[in-house]
Amino acid sequence: MNSWNRRTVTLLAGLAVVAGAGACDSGSSPTTSTTPTASGTGTIKIGVSTDEPGVSLKEGNTYSGFDIKTAEYVAGKLGLTPQWVPIAQADRVSALQSGEVEMVVATFSITDERKKQVDFAGPYFVAHQDLLIRLNDQTITRPERLDGKILCSVTGTTSAAYVQSHYDKAKITLREVPSFSECVRNLANGDVDAVTTDDLILAGFAATPEYKGILKVLGFGFTDETYGIGIKKGNTDLVTKVNGALKEYISSGAWKQALEETVAPSGYKIPNPPTVG
């Protein structure tokens, strides 16, 4: 995640047809009429997040959210069935490099540093880094008002990297934890003063029954977070195929429908789609 003055799926295949391993789940959200179905028995391992309401959430054996729908669409266009592999934000690059997964669809921002390590298809969405605060907090009205506050973010994210490079650590304490849900829980409990990550993710948490009326998104986006589908470095054939699927995902109306079904109910305003490739 970029600068106070600037406003930041999914998959498919290295055409590797892999059988499911015990660490992978195949349960997913109900598909829509716009979701293509796999044409055979082949599967593809896709790394996803599990604790982002409206974006990528695991409940029992079921996965739901915009990233999940994106990955399902892309996989369907490749004729494959997605096999979900839960991965932490900090492990997205290493999971691709090691071959644990063939693609990563997990609010994975495209950055120059990451492009040295993995390839990306997309982008398929542009979000903006923002702040989540308690509803009754009148002291944080913009990012510059964070002096003396405890700010929570997730290890291995561009949000955390941005804070580390732009904040005065003598004035703002950055607390990094493994998951977004832990950050948000700490905020609601009063253990931290704000949470920072992409507005799409924050809006999903603020809209859940647990936090509705308790937390709010500040609405002061200050970076562009360009989401791409991570693919192992050098697999240009897969990048080309996934880009083709993403272009059709957007042009067919399925992209907008996926957002309307997942994050729009929270009040999040759906932006214009990005240009793929």
Image: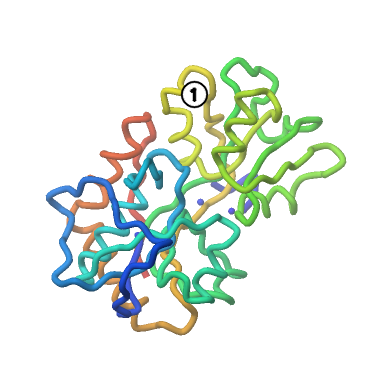
Q: Nearer the viewer, residue 144 or 73?
A: 73
Position in image of residue 256 (x %, y %): 26, 47
101 vs 168, nearest the viewer: 101
Q: Residue at x 21, y 58 (%)?
A: 251
Q: Indicate left or right for 14 with 233 as reference.
A: left
**Residue at 39% from the left image edge and 34% from the top image edge:** 268
Dot 1 lies on which element?
loop
* Observer-nearest of 200 and 24: 24
Q: Residue furthest front?
A: 22
Q: In the rendered image of this protein, does residue 110 appear above or below residue 40?
A: above
Residue at the extreme right of the image, as rendered: 170
Residue extending farthest top: 136
Tell me which corner region of the image, top left, top right, bottom left or bottom right, holds residue 165: bottom right
Q: Position of residue 247 (x, y in %)?
A: 26, 65
**Position of residue 45 in the picture relative to residue 210 (left or right):** left
Q: Position of residue 112 (x, y in %)?
A: 59, 69
Q: Quadrant of the C terminus?
A: bottom left
Position of residue 265 relative to residue 6, above or below, is above
- Residue 240 is drawn in which quadrant? bottom left
Q: Residues within 10 Å of mark 1 (few under 14, many from 20)?
A: some
Residue 106 appears at what percent x and percent y?
Answer: 45, 56
Left or right of 65, for residue 5: right
Which residue is identified by label 1? 211
- Residue type for callout 1: Tyr
Relative to 7, is 277 above or below? Answer: below
Q: Determine the residue positioned at 40% across, 54% down.
A: 125
